[in-house]
Image (cartoon, grey):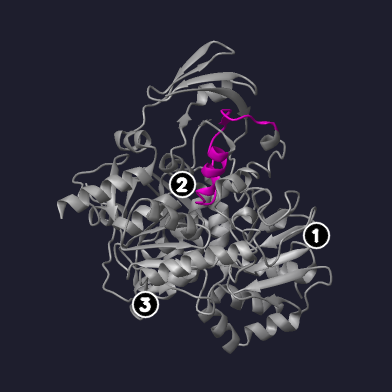
Amino acid sequence: MGKTLVEKILSAHTDSKDFKVGDIIIVKLDFAFSNDITAPLAIKVFEESGAKQVFDKKRIGIIPDHFAPNKDVKSAEQCKTMREFAHKHHIEHYFEIGKMGIEHALLPEKGLVLPGDLVAGADSHTDTSGALGAFAIGVGSTDMAYAIATGEVWLKVPPVIRLNYTGKLNKWVSGKDLILYTISKIGVDGANYKVMEFSGEVIKNLSMDNRFTMCNMAIEAGAKTGIIEPDEKTIDYVDSRAKRPYKVFKNDSDVTYEKIIDYDVSNIEPQVSFPHSPGNAKSISEVGNIKIDQSIIGSCTNGRMEDLRIAAEILKEHSVHPEVRLIVFPATQSIYQQALKEGLIDIFISAGAAVSTPTCGPCIGGHMGLLAKGERSISTTNRNFVGRMGHPESEVYLSNPAVAAASAILGKIASPEEVK
Amino acid sequence: MIIKGKVWKFGDNIDTDVIIPARYLNTSDPKELAMHCMENYDANFIKEMNPGDIVVAGANFGCGSSREHAPIALKAAGVSCVIAKSFARIFYRNAVNIGLPIFESIELVDECSKGDILEIDTDKGIIKNLTTNKVYNTTALPEFIQKIISLGGLKAYLKEELKRREQNV
């Protein structure tokens, strides 16, 4: 029986022989990273454990992106802790404000996570890098302390479910809509402890930006990670960026999956996930009249070039509705700069949007766009839990960037088709 | 270890933003985190619960972010154990790693109510509901996880591992 690319990546990173699904194995990491929420705790555990040095200063990323630029004194202290740790241990991939981006967009962009890698990140959206054909898992801070001290983590070997997408994508339907639709079908724990492998002709034709979006939200179905088998598009993306050699793993032709689920995308419309679960997705035609106070375009889910281009295409020569705040935050500095060069930032500002430096701030209800009691936001981010973006009685609706842009113009959740 | 405590009951898909909202994550101080534990779900929980109380919840407890601050907040609030129908995977490993006892039992969750008194033998995984006099067996944890828990968490395991490696060099 053949092997999946997941089994092949795990085999290449462990001394355990003949492991099977459910076994606990220790794996060697190619890259380990953490942010200003998870790193300070990891550093504390690292120091209390008596560890003297990190496993490899070239294979650790430390990224202040959540409450950075520092939102208050406590956040400043957290960022200081990680900055000092990075300097003390000569960590090569510490990204200061100004060079920083949201970690899950930044690391692939910089060629620091690569196909075939085994990656651990102290952030649940680490699964984003699965779009490169890496096995990338979110872990906690104590795991991260263990990882930076030893270069290893423990994990339970997961089964793989294959999600196969066929048919023709409708206009305005993106990777975001496919993943929201999928989560609504399999449930928010539909892939708990499992790997979601996205495949089929639709995925083959999907851009890297959209593939990142899909893998990013595998965690929202409980998955250990999402993954896409590398192809020419992956290699095109990676080749000019890779900072070290990498290995491409592919599925054998005769592999068996725990489950294969087929989706015909021809009937899928843009999706909107209603509060308070990413799994509450409805088609845009079924949304009804829902007024909004805020629209957020950006994040590790939808803050890449294609996302900004499509938002600008809709906002061009339009104005943000007088009762709506639109905040656009590109995911990395390079994306921000490219958007400037392409004139997208000018379109956003002319329409009346606020444009922010990269940060996770609004997505997590941290800073830069919190909601008051009773307020409502449409957002291209990944979670709409109770209180996610501010007051426990505020509401978040998740969508793709085209819908978020159209909604900002019309003051209610709207399809791009409604913008004349 | 024997744990005895009163039940607080929660539903399915209790996410980490509910357990500890991100707006409080500008600190990793357990005491401060504990003050806001479950605030988005029930602001009275932290005022009314007593140290040693047990959280009983439905499926997919701890879904969402990887913040270890979630099990830390529960532990620092005095929660002695979490029993759920199932756990989201990162919460599960975080709880194990910081030494917060967790158990899975669909039957127990379905059959117990707020205020019931449970007695848990953590080594054997046997849970007694002293209010209803019913006994539940939970699945034994894998050996590796039992080892981490018996040491008190992954930090202690790391300490041992670093010593072992030093001696082998």
Residue B64 within the magenta-colored segment of the rendering: yes
Find residue A283 and report its horizontal and vertical position in percent. 66, 55
Disc 2 is attached to a residue of which chain?
B
Give the residue at mark 3: A236
Amino acid at pointer 3: Asp
Mark 3, secondary structure of its residue: helix
Give the residue at mark 2: B90
Q: Residues within 10 Å of mark 2 (few under 14, many from 20)?
A: many
Whether callout 1 and callout 2 share a subunit is answered no
Find residue B26 and report its horizontal and vertical position in percent. 59, 58
- Tell me: residue B118, above or below residue A313: above
Q: Residue furthest right?
A: A322
Whether callout 3 and callout 1 share a subunit is answered yes
Amino acid at pointer 2: Ile
- Tell me: residue A106, above or below residue B115: below
Give the residue at mark 1: A291
Mark 2, secondary structure of its residue: helix
- Tell me: residue B157, above or below residue A402: above
Q: What span is colored magenta in the figure?
A: B48-76
Q: Residues within 10 Å of mark 3 (few under 14, many from 20)?
A: few
Residue A232 within the magenta-colored segment of the rendering: no
